[in-house]
Image: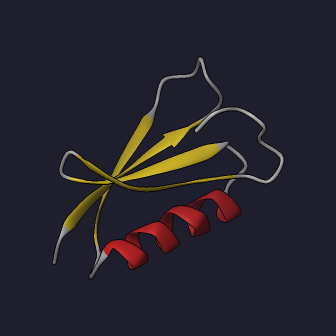
Amino acid sequence: MPRYKLHLHDGPVTPVVTEVIDVQDDEDAKDLARITLLMTKAYTHAEVYRGRDLVGTCKRDSYGGET
């Protein structure tokens, strides 16, 4: 199973929180990032990486900042 990293952001100045996940594919990793944002109010947006490659990003509807 591939290993992914979720970089969870709380706005532009708070340090990034990184979670390591092992899931089947890119789509599962992006789904997990969206679920993480839905389940907690602590983060404004998330980036999904496989190794050094950016797989995708997602953000809360209420977050207007850059991802």
- Give residue 66's position: percent from left, percent from top: 64, 33
| Whether residue 4 can be seen here | yes
Rendered residue at 20%/45% (across/down): 52
Which corner quadrant of the image does residue 23 belong to? bottom left
Q: Nearer the viewer, residue 61 or 22?
A: 61
| Position of the N terminus by quadrant | bottom left
Q: Nearer the viewer, residue 49 or 42?
A: 49
Location of residue 23 with respect to 44 vertically, above or below: below
Which corner quadrant of the image does residue 48 belong to? bottom left
- Give residue 63's position: percent from left, percent from top: 77, 41
| Whether residue 43 can be seen here | no
Left or right: residue 6 compared with residue 67: left
- Give residue 17's position: percent from left, percent from top: 44, 37
Rendered residue at 59%/65% (across/down): 34
Left or right: residue 55 compared with residue 50: right
Rendered residue at 59%/17% (across/down): 13
Colouring scheme applied when the structure was drawn: secondary structure
Location of residue 47 with respect to 37 vertically, above or below: above
Location of residue 47 with respect to 31 vertically, above or below: above
Rendered residue at 58%/39% (across/down): 67
Left or right: residue 62 compared with residue 15: right
Location of residue 17 with respect to 45 vertically, above or below: above
Residue at the right extreme? Answer: 62
